Image: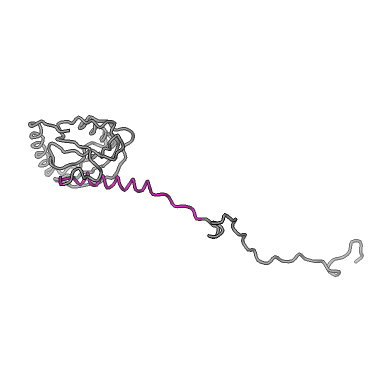
Amino acid sequence: MPNRSPLLPCLLRAGHQLQRLWWRVRRPRTFGVQVLLRHPDRSGRVLAVRHSYADPERWSLPGGGYRPRRESAQDAARREVREELGLEVTGTLAVLTTRTVTTSGKRDTVTVLTGTAASADAHLSYELREARWVRPDLTDLAGEPTSQWLRMALDRLRAVRGRQRTPGPQRADPRPHGAARRGRPPPRAHRGPQPAPARHGHHGARRRGSCA
């Protein structure tokens, strides 16, 4: 899914360099999203992209900046996927992690999310150079540079799925091991010796109708 537009990527790279210089002067606080998009056929494949301007040789994730006062991270992720890839996300977008990094002078808080694409047929915008559905172990990209965000998102997704497959703790059976195995009921608790009932002797009580 390549994007062959020779002039726009050059302009984007020049604009990105100017923006980085501006960040070093102003040192702004920014917010962004990265989206680990899963293939709709549930095969486990994810979408890796190459951008046209920032680090164009490295495989990374689609995403971009947003303003928290105007939209949530989930809304921003859906918008970025729609604008960059022409795709919609079905169902919910789950947050994998949120990290704050300092790059080029700015303090950037990045939220990494994951969701399933409604279609596998992406239509790239001028911001992307290439996109490819790859296996989650990234063997399809062997020998090619990949971004820390792509690797981190895959690690977090594997960790989440591992926790979902782990069964919860089982309640212990209070019966002894042999009784539990043979299906016998638990033994009754030992209460100790019981006191004998009191007996009335000839001198302990008066007979009815007797005189004092």
Q: Main secondary structure of the magenta part?
A: helix
Q: Which corner quadrant of the image does residue 121 belong to?
A: top left
Which quarter of the rendering shows the C terminus?
A: bottom right
- How many marks can you see? 0
Q: Which corner quadrant of the image does residue 114 belong to?
A: top left
Q: Residue at left 86%, top 69%?
A: 202
* Residue 178 image offset from top left, x and y in percent: 55, 60
Q: Nearer the viewer, residue 75 or 144?
A: 144
Residue 148 colored in magenta in the image: yes
Q: Residue at left 89%, top 64%?
A: 207
Pick out the residue farthest to the bottom: 203
Which quarter of the rendering shows the N terminus?
A: top left
* Residue 192 image offset from top left, x and y in percent: 65, 66
Q: Is residue 100 placed above or below 205 in the rendered structure?
A: above
In this rendering, position of residue 179 left or right of residue 61: right
In this rendering, position of residue 166 left or right of residue 30: right
Q: How is the image coloured?
A: one colour
* Residue 4 image offset from top left, x and y in percent: 11, 31
In this rendering, position of residue 75 left or right of residue 209: left
* Residue 131 image offset from top left, x and y in percent: 18, 36
Span of residues in magenta = 143-172
Residue 121 colored in magenta in the image: no
Q: Residue at left 64%, top 63%?
A: 191
Q: Is residue 194 placed above or below 109 in the rendered structure?
A: below
Q: Is residue 117 placed above or below 103 in the rendered structure?
A: above
Q: Which corner quadrant of the image does residue 22 belong to?
A: top left
